[in-house]
Image (tube, helix red, strand yellow):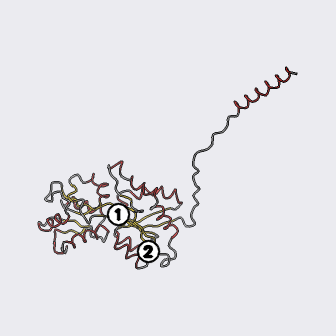
Amino acid sequence: MKKLLALILASAMALSMVACSSAPAEEPNTEPETPEVVTPADPELLMATTTSTDNTGLLDYLEPYFEEATGYDISWTAVGTGAAIQMGVDGEVDVILVHSKASEEQFVADGNGVERFQVMYNDYVIVGPTGGAVAYTNDIDAALTQIKDEGLTFVSRGDDSGTHKAELKLWKALDVDVATLGDAYVSAGAGMGDTLVMADEMDAYCLTDRGTWLAKKANFPEMEIVVEGSAGLLNQYGVIAVNPEVYPDTNIDGANAYIEWLCSEEVQALIADFGVAEYGEPLFFPNANK
């Protein structure tokens, strides 16, 4: 009997060891599940925006993240802020991303937009010929006064963009009517990139957003920043959905999805990282939640 029990016990132990060696326990799956993106009923989303968000490459950088996360297919038209807002007024787009706070608030007050959300900011700088008459300063008033008094050439966007509006506001603060500047004041009627080209060719000064300057400055080795860090040079961006009560065919679901996504912590972090590796500093500073 003892021998029989010993044999049974030995057989049981052997079977147990074989089972453990041939069928190891599966490790738990710790990988987070990727939520399945449901294709929206109307996936086409149209946006009007400024040349600065386009010229810097920010929109191209964000586009695949947005489309992967939401299933929407976004396309945009990059023009001056005034023209972008007008596209919203005319119901040609679903959402606008621009940078002229007063005009944005008027767009909403007139009933053309639903609600304005701030997204990010950078600042404006004045650039001009390297070693030119205007020495580097943080005093925008002194620099513009010198440009006026010495008849130095200044190239304006002249296109009703956010940058153009900001520039005119700076001249107005000095009680200067740009019409009195004569031939020294050149209206480009163009986007920021083309305006920089004109200023470079004319050895002139111009106001530009820092993001576009960082993205384009390699093309202008004979130009440099001459004014920065002055009060009043903040460049704030806002995003607004076009009012579906005015234009019922607008893609309000897509517009709201874009706004919510753009203002999320994850995407604000993407914006904060944009440009750092290439330029050593961000082109935009996110502030949707501030």
Q: Is residue 83 above or below residue 194?
A: below
> Which residue is the extreme one toward the right?
1
- Find residue 279 and report its horizontal and vertical position in percent: 32, 50
Q: Which amino acid does label 1 sit on?
A: Thr
Q: Residue at x 56, y 64 (%)?
A: 40
Q: Position of residue 262 (x, y in %)?
A: 45, 61
Report which quarter residue 212 is drawn in. bottom left
Left or right relative to 211: residue 35: right
Q: How far from the left and from the top, in percent, is residue 250?
A: 50, 73
| 260, 201: nearer the viewer | 260
Q: Which residue is drawn at 46% across and 65% down?
A: 259
Q: How many numbered marks, from 0 up?
A: 2
**Circle 1 residue:** 51
Mark 1 Cα shell of 10 Å, populated few (<14), some (14-19), many (≥20): many
Image quarter of the N terminus: top right
Q: Is 126 or 45 nearer to us in this picture?
A: 126
Q: Which mark is residue 113?
A: 2
Q: Is mark 2 on a helix, strand or loop?
A: strand
